[in-house]
Image (spheres, rainbow, N blue to C red):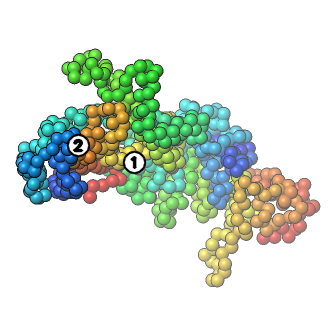
Amino acid sequence: MEPLLEVKNLKVRFSTDEGPIEAVRDVSFEIKRGETVAIVGESGCGKSVMARAILRIVPAPGNIVEGQINYYRDGRAIELTALEAKGAEIRAIRGADIAMIFQEPMATFSPVHTIGNQINEAIILHQSIDHAGATAQTLDILNRVGMPRPSRIIHRYPHQLSGGMLQRAMIAMALSCRPQLLIADEPTTALDVTTQAQILRLLYDLQREFNMAILFITHDLSVVSQFADRVEVMYLGEVVESTDVIRLFEDPKHPYTRALLNSIPQTGAGRGQRLQSIAGSIPNPLHRPSGCLFHPRCDSFQPGVCDLVSPKEIDIDKDHRARCILYDEQYSDRVSSAAFGQ
Amino acid sequence: MLGFILRRILLFIPTLLFISILVFFLIQLPPGDYLDTLILRMQESGSSVDAETEALLRERYALDQPFLAQYTRWISNIVTEGDFGRSFNWNRPVSELIWSRLGWTLAISLGSLLFTWALAFPIAIYSATNQYSLFDYFFSFIGFIGLAIPNFLLALVLMWIGFSVFGVSMGGLFSSEFRDAPWSIEKFIDFLSHLWVPIVVLGTAGTAGLIRTMRANLLDELNKPYVEAARAKGLRERRLIWKYPVRVALNPFISSLATILPGMISGATIVSVVLNLPTTGPLMLDALLQQDMFLAGSFLLMLSLFTLVSTLISDILLVLVDPRIRLD
């Protein structure tokens, strides 16, 4: 299938007073039409910055310093990274071709404008349509996201709605121009568990209905297992493993992915068993470890290799890559067999 | 909404009554009264007043009566006839003195308010959206200087420059030849050529302060998720900044309106004295110094009324612009 979006060797750097921080480095992946790609990682791994880079809304002082993002429309590639970040071309893509929903629905609507006003605005911006037509579309899309009584909701202000309703409204706003790609940045994190499930179900149904691709950014592996086709696991700005969702859960390769999976609480686990966690904590991005970024926390750490060599992305199988020297033939003689035992 | 406004206006009555008692009491609190000041001044200039005349005068001004009787007479005259009493010092009805002064004061204050806003908002928005840029630093520097210079000093400097460089006197609102002339186009032009001085002097500190607050308010709002969401919609940067964060950052100013109106009357006294402006400030200061009690009392009463009215106005505006605020 043809790609909808491809990210090649992307690097995003934040120039801070304390020094440069590479929030995203050498990230490459692809999203095909209609597919769901999840970016998984702990807070601070660069997944949200990654998402914003696609829309070219990386907040200052962040900048895309290397790499390419291509968006395919009607068989033609548009190089998003070559566009002016505040220019008309990228603005025509934002909200129309690629839309985004955010983590905190309560804060993503302006508190002093009505819901209807804010959804209408998106519609009028990208379509040649009058106000009445836009309102009709707003009501229609609010209906589709399962909003009760849309004709009343459009006159409401954000503080008058619940978090779940606001996230539905946010989804409605994002889908109002029928985007090809929806970027969902932790859309359920701020919601309670039952609402989370409803919103995920809704996204799943709407994806079928609208035939759009979703880039799902989350730290929640259970959401990934229900929802994603492909998964990119990120650690400190790098993709450490890239695979489809089945192989991620059944045959994880990178020690970080394995550690992440091990730290999910198991319902079948015996009483009194401690919840596994990954040793250590995420390093300060200003002081990255040498060699493999994960080596200080890794239980397959190979002294003399991992702390010196920056691992390359290795193709393990078709569409399955891991950034780890365990799979690099170049170092196979220096890796103890115990490292693979898990 | 209408019920709320009516309730608030009804509340004005007891509040004003209470304030008027307090005001009248405070004015009488210093030892002596206007007559003592008058007699003292006459004695200084050589003439003397015998006890009989003094008693006569005291009776005429009703200064010999007890506090409550004096107060009741004053307030009932205001309520029933709109008569604020006579100014001892000017020997004219208070109402004759204060209305024209209030008019000039409002004109100058509104002018400087508009000057402040017209200058401060664009600069603040520029500074916030281009934080730490060259112009941001430049405006911050100018702003702090503006804040640090006392207004009266700025007035003096401007007057000195006007006099020594351009050879014109910048005080007052009119040149001497127009002062008592009837209104004409020439007089109006003359008025405008004088008006800018107090407006600039009074507006400078306000502008500097407003830039600082607006910049800080806006910086708080610029990183809010709703701004990012608007950007992700594809809105033009300038349009989204004016529609969303600027709009939200304005709310604190609407609540600050409550202090602006009374400040218009009481504020800027020193500048008005320096610039020789026919505004309320100097007159009120004089009235208080000389214990010209009906004049001072009326001013203070006016101030209270303005405070109440402007608080009400800013409350109504806040309800109108911020849907999160509810009346009940």
Q: Left or right of B211: which side holds B315? A: left
Identify residue type, mark 2: Glu
Q: Amino acid at mark 1?
A: Pro
**Residue at point 63%, 77% (across, down):** A268
Image quarter of the N terminus of chain A: top right
Would you call the spot at circle 1 few (<14 residues within 10 Å), some (14-19), or many (20 or more)?
few
Q: Chain of mark 2?
A: B
Query: Can the viewer see residue B61?
Result: no
Work out how far the residue at label 2 is from the one at label 1, CA to CA, in angstroms: 53 Å
In the displayed structure, A264 sits above or below A130; it is below
Badge 2 marks a residue whose secondary structure is: helix
Res B44 label = 2
The quadrant of the rendering that contains the C terminus of chain A is bottom right
Decide which of B309, A60 is in the foreground and name it. B309
Q: x and y percent of residue A159 in the render?
A: 39, 55
Which residue matches tag 1? B252
Q: Position of residue A192 (x, y in %)?
A: 48, 65
Residue ranking furthest to the bottom: A272
Q: Which of the 4 image quadrants contains residue B199?
A: top left
Q: Is residue B75 visible?
A: yes
